[in-house]
Image (tube, rainbow, N blue to C red):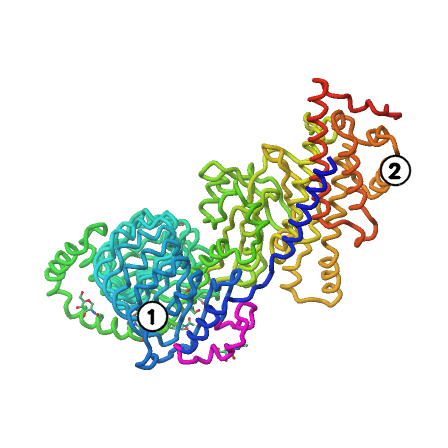
Amino acid sequence: MAALSYHLYYQLTFLSTFLFLIPHTTQLQSSQSWSLLRIQHLLNYPSVLSQWHDYTDFCYGAAENASASVVCYQDSVTQLHIIGNEGTPPLPKTFSMESFFTTLTRLPDLKVLTLTSLGLWGPLPTKISRLSNLEIVNISSNYFFGAIPHEISRLSNLQTLILDYNMFSGQVPDWLTKLPLLAVLSLRNNTLDGNIPDSIGSLSSLRSLTLSSNNLSGDVPDLTGLKNLQILDLENNSLGPNFPKLERRIITVVLKGNKFTGGLPSDLGSFYLLEHLDLSSNRFVGPFSPLLLSLPSIKYLSIRGNRFTGTLVRNMSCNEELGFVDLSENLLSGNLPACLDLSSQHSKAVLYSGNCLGSTNNSSDKQNPLVFCQNQALAVGIVPPQKEGNTEKKKASVAVAIIGGVVLGVLLGAILVFFAVRKKNDRKASNKAPRRLVEHVSSAYPSKLLTDARYISQTAKLGALGIPQYKSFSLVDLEAATNNFEKSNLIGEGSYGQMYRGRLSNGTSVIIRCIKVKKGQSTQNFNRHIETISKLRHRHLVSALGHSIEYNLEDSTVSQLFLIFEYVPNGNLRNKISHGVDGQNLSWTQRISAAIGVAKGIQFLHGGIIPGLFANNLKITNVLLDQNLGAKICSYNLALLSENTKLEIEAEGLSLGLLKEFSEREMHGGEIDIYDFGVILLEIVSGKPITSHHEVLIMKSLLQSAIASDCAASRKAIADPDACKTCSDESLRTVMEICLRCLSKDPPQRPSIEDVLWNLQFAAQVQEGWHADSFSSEGSPVSPSQPCRPTN
Ligand SMILES: *[C@@H]1O[C@H](CO)[C@@H](O)[C@H](O)[C@H]1NC(C)=O
Ligand SMILES: *[C@@H]1O[C@H](CO)[C@@H](O)[C@H](O)[C@H]1NC(C)=O
Ligand SMILES: *[C@@H]1O[C@H](CO)[C@@H](O)[C@H](O)[C@H]1NC(C)=O
Ligand SMILES: *[C@@H]1O[C@H](CO)[C@@H](O)[C@H](O)[C@H]1NC(C)=O
Ligand SMILES: *[C@@H]1O[C@H](CO)[C@@H](O)[C@H](O)[C@H]1NC(C)=O
Ligand SMILES: *[C@@H]1O[C@H](CO)[C@@H](O)[C@H](O)[C@H]1NC(C)=O
Ligand SMILES: *[C@@H]1O[C@H](CO)[C@@H](O)[C@H](O)[C@H]1NC(C)=O
Ligand SMILES: *[C@@H]1O[C@H](CO)[C@@H](O)[C@H](O)[C@H]1NC(C)=O
């Protein structure tokens, strides 16, 4: 026995020493430092890298800048961001894209690569495929030319590919389906031509597709398979004639400046998440559906520059959130709906010139005479709106020919007015367009943080075994999981927001916390917190399975955060040890193993993630049990989850007093947790709920005298008789001793979590040995109360 425990002790001390040795910051491999400096050289020493020197400690944040930063994991670069100045001219003739990428491939662990506005010129080298860990690539605003290389399809981890503002030519790749994780594809402002390949329609992870400002033509392939698509931007191409087939949960649709004709699909009115619809500068015809003004989510609607017809009436209704409406240059008649009157809501921008609307109060809004719209409408109205565009054209011209003679004079005059107005309004409309939703796109970024795992130590990695992979969820997933956040699934509500139970499509039960976010929280701040949350994955924590972020689309700030945690089915620890509550009382062995679980969870919170989480307000009721009676801590001091938090302090600016209090809490947070753990242990031993400080003091003094006693029975007397039917005295005593030490009044006197763990494991070993002995010797267990009868 002694030999065993000595051996165990030795091993554990060695182990815990080892854990302390795991470095928190690291020194970059010198070859990688050299590569970074070489990159600086090849880029011709841009001013954004003026801080990079031979002696720069790249991994330690010394080279950090909003425009240039390096992130490392262990001793290797995982992220490289260099953002040059807008309009940087091409690098000199001596620049070689091939050598530049050769140098880049010497950073083999790169996951995130941003190289924008650096004057890079040349074809994108095929050796980019050697950077096989790449997840996010943004090489916008350079002078890349030639085809997008097929080798990119080997980057099987790629989630985000942004090649905006370059001179890539050829077709939109049809091998993108080889990138199963691709969520963001942006090829804005290149010189791509041809059709959009049908294979785009099977990129099931795609959330944002931007192909604007190319020379693409033909019909858009069926996109109804893209269940996650939120943003579709096809502006300034020659696409058409048919309106794209879309999944109705899309949020942003920009078809501006293409060759779409015909009518709108009749189911557009059921696109309940649609916030931004821009159909301007196409050749749409047919009646304008007033439903578009009252779509439940619509905020931005432009139909400018088409040939929509119909009569508007004053009593039409609009969605209240509608902030921008442009109806200009169509064939609308009647009166502007009252809900669009500028006076009714001055934050709205409403444009409607170049129609045939009557009696608007503004003499300068340039409406055409009614007859203009009527005649034009007659011309295009012959065509049923659903029909294909080319038949429309033919029939329309026939109609014009028939009516032509009669109205030619009127028409000519009107057309002149029409074009005059059109020109004048063009500029205004584009100024009023809201800022692009860049943040929305970058919501792919948090997911990189998950796998990046910069700081996860060995403890963390081992602990996370068996927990499903962390991922980001879509709001649609969460709605499905909770039956649209149905009341019956609500299991808690606080000032932070609500908590729901739910079931994911794969059958996993989850808890979803909906956290309200104060206005103006920066996305960056959030990414940091989400990074922490994504690391909270350990067997003995109720772990985070993922998150979902909702954005305000106007200003890209975060409006709501959803955190998804695993659901733990077996109730809390108190109910399994205090008499009668749950019908099932844990045995002594089970209790020690639960205590070990809690201690491991604490060890992870303190040291398995950086920054560690301390002062976690640990309570026995916050320790849940899974189906195997494994313990999981369900409440930890995570800024986003607790009330009095760092996040709020950060957000609101610090008073000095608060800062001091906060850092003290942080400083002694570890010892506070040990004390709280002692209270849990007390309850585990005694089997009695302990609900006040007073009770702790009483139990402590009982424990003290019991430990001091020579008689095992006096220890059994205060232990839960249920549990101690079969407990060895040595095991019980070891747990009591460590419990007492945890409850020391003076924080520095309390043991470290490693010390606690060692003692508990020892208690478990002793118990196991005892158990085995007692069975093997006589064939029946030795009565535990044999050595010394309890006195009671
Ligand atoms: C940050 O980048 C700018 C260029 O955008 C540069 O002028 C400045 O020196 C950099 N600052 C630091 C601290 O690296
Ligand atoms: C690509 O990076 C640049 C520079 O950081 C940024 O301005 C731009 O928004 C990024 N593109 C996308 C689509 O996120
Ligand atoms: C593409 O971007 C360049 C520079 O930003 C701009 O001059 C050009 O007009 C853009 N092309 C299109 C088609 O928008
Ligand atoms: C766009 O493609 C058409 C042919 O489809 C071609 O005639 C035209 O010149 C191209 N425009 C540009 C700017 O490349
Ligand atoms: C689309 O083209 C129009 C006219 O050529 C131009 O004013 C607008 O800036 C372009 N939009 C984009 C996003 O490039
Ligand atoms: C609008 O008013 C007209 C009569 O002026 C009425 O026939 C119509 O039902 C009203 N529509 C709505 C939506 O209230
Ligand atoms: C025009 O102004 C008058 C009085 O200011 C108001 O009663 C009327 O509703 C307005 N008409 C329109 C179409 O805005
Ligand atoms: C009248 O219309 C013009 C152009 O559409 C606009 O600039 C002006 O602000 C409007 N005036 C009022 C009083 O609404």
The amino acid marked with disc number 1 is Tyr
Seen from the viewer's position, the closer of residues 275 and 508 is: 508
Q: Which residues are magenta?
A: 42-68
Where is residue 566? Give x, y as percent: 55, 41
Q: Which mark is residue 551?
A: none
Which residue is label 1 attached to? Answer: 165
Q: Residue at x 70, y 34 (%)?
A: 591
Q: Is residue 310 left or right of residue 646?
A: left
Q: Is residue 429 visible?
A: no
Quadrant assignment, res 759: top right
The amino acid marked with disc number 2 is Ala
Q: Disc 1 beta carbon < 8 A from ligand 3?
A: yes
Q: Residue at x 55, y 39 (%)?
A: 501
Quadrant where the N terminus sits is: top right
Q: Which mark is residue 708?
A: 2
> In whole angstroms, how far apart are the C-alphas of marks 1 and 2?
78 Å
Mark 1 vs mark 2, foreground winner is 2
